[in-house]
Image (spheres, rainbow, N blue to C red):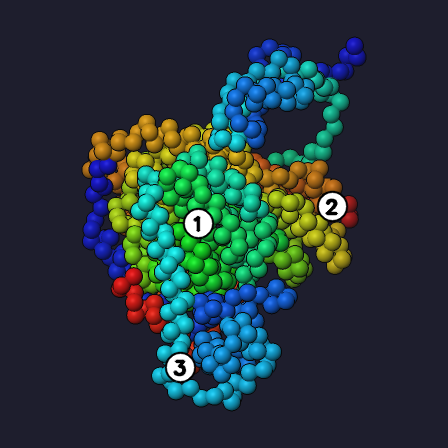
Amino acid sequence: MNEHVDLVTAYGDTRGDGAVQLSFTLPVTSGEKARQAALILAAKMGLEEPRVVLMDPIDPTFTYFILYGRTRESLDFSSIQVHEAAYEIMAPEEINRFIRETFGRKLVVIGACIGSDAHTVGIDAIMNMKGYDMHKGLESYPEIRALNLGAQVPCETLVARAMEEKADAVLVSQVVTQKNAHLKNFTRLIEILEAEGIAERMVLIVGGPQVTLELAKELGYDAGFGRGTYPEHVASFLVQELAGRKTKRG
Amino acid sequence: MGELNLSEAEVGRAREAAARIAADTLAEIEGKTTVAVERAVLRLLGVEGVTQDGVPWSNVVVDDLLSRDLLDKGAAVWFVRARTADGGSPEDTARRMVRGEVDYGSLPRVEPEDLRGRMRSLAREGLDRIDRSRSVREERLAELGRGREPLRYLIVATGDIHEDAIQARAAARGGADIIAVIRHTAQSLLDYVPEDGSIQGVGGTIANRGNFRVMREALDEVSEELGRYIFLTNYCSGLCMPEMAVLGAQERLDVMLNDSMYGVIFRDINMVRTFIDQHFSRALLARAGMMINTGEDNYLTTSDAFEKAHTVLASQFINEQFALKSGLAPGQIGLGHAFEISPKLEDSFLFELAQAQMVRQIFADCPVKYMPPTKYMTGNIFQGNVQNALFNAVSVLTDQSVHLLGMPTEALHTPHVHDRHLSLENVDYVFRAIRHLGEDIVFRPGGRIETRASNVLDKAVDMLEEIAGMGLMQAISEAMFADIARTREGGKGLEGVVAKAGDYCNPIAELLWEERALS
């Protein structure tokens, strides 16, 4: 075996046991036939020794299952390549000092929930003074002028405001993902920014519970932040990206 | 549960300030009407249906009157005069009005007393329809009975009304007492009601008469099956607030979400427009015997639940006073609050208990609605179930009236059918296990819980007195709620606000106010 191969599989209590748990509902009446259906589905998913540990009738037409089983699949962990935003997480004071020393002026960051989305919880967590989970938002950074335009901002309004304020970065958040509403809105914003010829001038960042860096890059953004992001993560990326661009320009 | 020792004088001061705030705000809007109020009036006078292009007749007529500068007398006046002249169906009259076939300058003169009589008799028919819906609800409630408080309030949000109906039935069978259908994202910003037949939406389902009927029918069916009346909820908010009140009242919805400031603060709808629309909407909901639910939970998704708890209480006092002045009885005023405190805070459970008990005591006759954790739900669905269990415990300990069930998958996706099932199981267990624990609890005088409640009350009193001094609209423009500032001239919908002429008439409002004490 190649010594660089690092095989991993799911771990329950013994390395290599492949133990997984899963739960799902079948739109059928609870009973022995339903239990068999759940086992067959699990087997088709590739689980070995599937066990139904709970078969719970939700109502006469739906049954909820919890199952355990073993996957026979494994993978070579060393072969995985991911996009990881290459930046170092800094503390808020460090970020402010970095801005003073590198740029000698305040950075302007504009944020909004674009399109039809009214869920500001994400953008508020990053931008508002209060922040989230004891991590203060960008408004609390003395060296950042943070403008949160709030919910349901048309892409055109956001772009116009970003140009007017000479923004260094644009932050957009989308929480609603039903029927891929978030992708349409993200794409539309990029199109407008490109049409205005300013997509290159600003750091473009997207956020939301379903956002990943891969998705962000694919859509043409510089970075994407998902669940568990704190304001200083976004700010750290932002200042380092801007500093990198400044160096490139010389 | 033992009562917290709260200063009655402080509660009295808070109510007095809130009453002043509501009265001053209503005085400011008294001489104005809105396109939405006028559309609602037309609907109640029988103007239903849509044009060939799918635009509601009520919209077309009101926009036409607005463009001719005639709306200041009230849409009812012109509609009834035109109808008297042509004698056709409401829709015929509407069609002739917008085609320019009605010469407003030379309509046959109708004696003012006669005109008023005709308007009132049509208005009476409109209100009769609402009264009939109310009677049906009362009969069914008497026959079937309702669930035990805290009533279990569950949300369906599939984006397709027929799928919503399937999930709602499953939820009711699992123990839900109230079903809320989440509305299409941003419908609140549409200045018209989308026509029937639009059964789908994004992030929720279009709210219109057709979809209200589908869900009402499904819930009536399952109510019969279960021998328990299942309540139906939708939104009475946004730019069509008064029309949603009409449709909800006619189609026997039981609960509508209606907050005095939500649209202004979180949807950036103009505040003058909102207060006018709201006053009329609430009078209709009062007449229809429906319950309103206010949205104080929203403050806490933006601001911190520990630091800003008093803003929730202050808003509840304001909502209560606006509601009373619109004719709602205390039993119809479902004031909202939420378990949004950070789980990282030591004694967070004590603070939530203090808040919930305080709200329960202060608004003793109101069906207080308690909403679950959302802000600190992380994707750890197992931990989320634990957070919900603590929330459930506070709710049953403090006798909340309406309990919105928390989902373990909150913030992940619109609930799967088993998310709701797990959540109902959680509630069942906690409510059953500690059903009467409250009876055996007394609060230690001067203890942490009582002290916390008193502090929140004191801060709410200060805030309300400050607002009463400057006026509510000024307070909102100074970001006193949710740290968001809105101006009197800003926001959506201001162009639909019209100053009333001296001979303005809204026959629906007249009857509602005259008969308010009787309803």
Q: Amino acid at mark 3?
A: Leu
In this view, the mark in front (3 or 1): 3
Tag of residue A220: 2
- Chain letter for mark 1, please: B
The location of residue A181, given as percent across then percent down, is 64, 47
* Real-space CA distance between mark 3 and mark 1, rounded to the nearest whole angstrom: 37 Å
* Real-space CA distance between mark 2 and mark 3, rounded to the nearest whole angstrom: 64 Å
- Chain letter for mark 3, please: B
Tag of residue B115: 3
Any part of residue B420 in sight = yes
Discs 3 and 1 share one subunit: yes
Quadrant placement of the N terminus of chain A: top right
* Real-space CA distance between mark 1 and mark 2, rounded to the nearest whole angstrom: 41 Å
Tag of residue B233: 1
Left or right of B228 in this view: A214: right
The location of residue B49, given as percent across then percent down, is 55, 65
Q: Amino acid at mark 1?
A: Thr
Discs 1 and 2 share one subunit: no
Left or right of B399 in this view: A175: right
Left or right of B388 in this view: B165: right
Any part of residue B461 in sight = no
Q: Amino acid at mark 2?
A: Gly
The location of residue A65, given as percent across then percent down, is 54, 24
Name the quadrant containing residue B236: bottom left
Disc 3 secondary structure class: helix
The location of residue A139, given as percent across then percent down, is 53, 50
Q: Residue at x 44, y 49 (%)?
A: B233
